[in-house]
Image (spheres, rainbow, N blue to C red):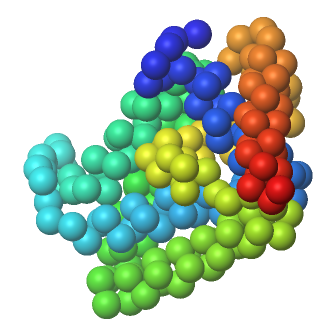
Amino acid sequence: MAKGLFDLENHFAFYGAYHSNPINILIHTIFVWPILYTALVLFQFTPTLFSFALADDKVVALNFSFVFALIYAVFYVLMDRKAGSLAAILCFLCWIGSESLATRLGFSLGWKVVLAAQVFCWTGQFLGHGLFEKRAPALLDNLVQAFLMGPLFVLMEVLQMLIGYEPYPGFHARVSKKIEANRKEWQDKRQKKIT
């Protein structure tokens, strides 16, 4: 139960307070990872930061796509060793897949595909918040935390639903209390603005 930057409980509670409606959670489960993936596709077109040769004379060029995948992967492992390691593997699979797709599409088509996917996914997410959650997205209150936590949050929600995963005993009970407190505080502020 690390505190501060890698405090999974507080990050999860922050993000969870904006995602309590089951339909909105489903929308995010469907769209969050594609947003990360298509962003990595776009970052594949950035200049090479460093490269190295493999034994078979193939050159691996690392750019901002790799850097972002690495940042997400390290952050997730430091947040939770088990689910974070799975999320880190998914980040690197997204990076590998993004390189393959970017190579096939090329920049002139690639950025258009990324733009279309991003607009579609973000529209779905904003509709989920407006129609079902009735609360603005977390990114309006903390952009960095929302972008970093989104993929791990939906992965952990799926793991919890499928296999009852908890990073440690009592995690979901503690987080649920924090989410309820956060939502009550938000509703009280909202009610005061109305009256």
**Residue 169 at x, y percent in the picture:** 78, 9
Q: Is residue 24 above or below residue 168?
A: below
Report whether residue 19 is seen.
Answer: no
Q: In this view, does 89 lie to the left or right of 23?
A: left
Q: Is residue 186 above or below residue 116?
A: above
Residue in view at x 78 percent, y 49 percent:
192
**Residue 86 at x, y percent in the picture:** 58, 33
Q: As rendered, which of 55 and 168 lies closer to the eye?
A: 168
Point out the image quarter for the C terminus: bottom right
Q: In this view, does 95 lie to the left or right of 130?
A: left
Q: Is residue 137 above or below residue 106?
A: above
Residue in view at x 83 percent, y 70 percent:
131
Residue in view at x 50 percent, y 47 percent:
142
Residue in view at x 43 percent, y 41 percent:
72
**Residue 98 at x, y percent in the picture:** 42, 64
Point out the image quarter for the N terminus: top right
